[in-house]
Amino acid sequence: MKVIVPVESKSLDAPVCPSFGRTPLFVLFDTESGNHEFIDNSAASSQGGAGIKAAQMLVDSGAEALITYRCGENAAEVLNAANIKMFKAQDGSIAVNIAKYKDGKLSLLTEIHPGFHNHGGGK
């Protein structure tokens, strides 16, 4: 299964980025092969709609699950329409969150916020 996580640097030891739409990078991790790749988030510099654009990028990447601390409602609609499950990130590195995901220890992300419309992000 392909899992995607927002991250600020190209390291599996980095923490999960607190921002979804404006994260600088995503890491796409294949839980079966262990392979991963870092993807630049071109939506991060958008004037508006960064979350929606980032969500569409995740759909295009083939991701089947997202691990994140939070997600705006417009981005969540895009992800839900594509059947991408959202899981609540926990403190720790990307590697720790991937391991918890594989062990079934992450809960579904159910608290979807209204978004940071016209705020240029919300770190």
Image (cartoon, rainbow, N blue to C red):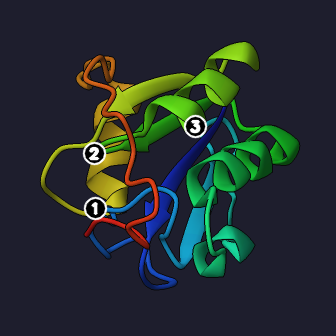
State the mark number for residue 46. none
Q: Which residue is mark 3?
A: 75
Q: Are marks 2 and 1 in contact (CB under 8 Å)?
A: yes
Residue at x 30%, y 65% (from the top left corner): 122
Q: Secondary structure at mark 1?
A: loop
Farthest residue in the right direction? 60
Position of 1 with respect to 100 (left or right) is right
Nearer the observer, 89 or 96: 89
- The Cα atoms of the two marked residues, 1 and 3, are separated by 15 Å
> x, y percentage for residue 92?
16, 59
Q: Can you say which quadrant of the picture contains the C terminus? A: bottom left
x and y percentages locating residue 27 in the rendered image: 58, 63
Q: Is residue 35 or residue 84 the one in the foreground?
A: 84
Relative side of 2 to 8, left or right:
right
For disc 2, the marked residue is 69
Cα distance in 3D space between marks 2 and 3: 13 Å
Any part of residue 40 in sight: no
Q: Nearer the viewer, mark 1 or mark 3?
A: 3
Which is more N-terminal, label 3 or label 2? 2
- Is residue 76 depicted above or below 36 in this figure? above
x and y percentages locating residue 121 in the rendered image = 39, 68
- For the residue pair 114 and 42, the one nearer the viewer reads as 114
Tell me which amino acid carries mark 2: Tyr
Residue 18, numbered label: 1
Instruction: Name the N-terminal-most of marks 1 and 3.
Output: 1
Q: Which element carries disc 2, helix, strand or loop?
A: loop
Residue 4 in percent (x, y) is at 58, 48
The kind of secondary structure element at disc 3 is helix
